[in-house]
Amino acid sequence: MEKIAEFEKVSFEQFKEAWLNCFPDTEDVKAVYDSIKMPKRATSGSAGYDFYAPSDITFNKGMSNLIPTGIRAKINDGWVLCIFPRSGLGFKHRIQLDNTVGIIDSDYYNSSNEGHIMIKLSCDAHFDNYSVVVKAGDGFAQGIFMPFGVTVDDDSTAVRDGGFGSTTK
């Protein structure tokens, strides 16, 4: 199998800024950062690389959580990393990605935010007052690398700098 990417941690400074923006009451961000697990496949036949919760995260019905993963991906040209929620979370608790599929392009790695992969999930449970907790270290999303092509008349030369929606800026 062709090896086309590598996961890395973003710097502590980048993670701290993003984490405190999303979870301002965290007392020990360094401990959260130090506990980050690198994405990996559960089995040799798995397509998806599991992303693990850096800390306990509560998903309440009707609410969204933006989760700084502390991870970035160095991806070869011609490939993309697609992010999906873990199947079990969607099936059991109706946890879903706010943008349906996250697209991590190869040039995102060089962004000013170090290519920090942020995953926004919502709980759309059928029950009132419903919540579910994903424990620190448990898988909550998965990433699948896919090849892509471009048209013969493609002439794109723009350079990205940023996260969500940055390709149109």
Image (spheres, helix red, strand yellow):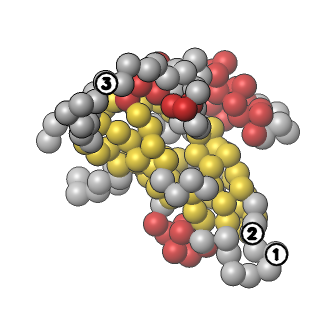
For label 3, the crowd category at 10 Å Cα-Cα, with few meaning under 14, some 14 to 19 and many 20 or more, is: few
The front one of 14 and 99 is 99
Identify the image quadrant of the C terminus: top right
Question: Who's the residue at 75% across and 39% down the image?
Answer: 22
Q: Nearer the viewer, residue 107 or 34?
A: 107
Locate the N terminus and report the quarter of the image it occupies: top left
Distance in Å between CA atoms under marks 2 and 1: 7 Å
Give the number of callouts: 3
Q: Report x, y in % for residue 18.
A: 69, 30
Can see residue 136?
A: no
Which element type, helix, strand or loop, lies under badge 1? loop
Q: Earlier in the sequence, mark 3 or mark 2?
A: 2
Task: Give the residue at the far front of this rendering.
Answer: 153
Query: Comparing marks 3 and 1, which lies closer to the viewer?
Result: 3
Could you tell which of marks 2 and 1 lies nearer the N-terminus? Answer: 2
Q: Secondary structure at mark 2?
A: loop
Q: What residue lies at 54% left-to-right and 21% top-to-bottom?
A: 161
Q: Say which element carries label 3.
A: loop
Residue marked by disc 1: 129
Going by the numbered disc 2, the residue's amino acid type is Lys
Gap in angstroms between the C-alphas marked 3 and 1: 51 Å
| Residues under numbered marks 2 and 1 in contact, where contact means CB atoms less than 8 Å apart | yes
Foreground of the two, 137 or 67: 67
Left of 137 or right of it: where is 28?
right
Residue located beneath label 2 in the image = 61
Determine if residue 18 is in view. yes
Q: Position of residue 60 (x, y in %)?
A: 75, 64
| In this rendering, position of residue 144 left or right of residue 149 | right
Q: In 3D space, how far apart are the residues under numbered discs 3 and 2 (Cα atoms)?
A: 44 Å
What amino acid is at disc 3? Asp
Q: Position of residue 23 (x, y in %)?
A: 78, 40
Q: Which residue is mark 3?
A: 155
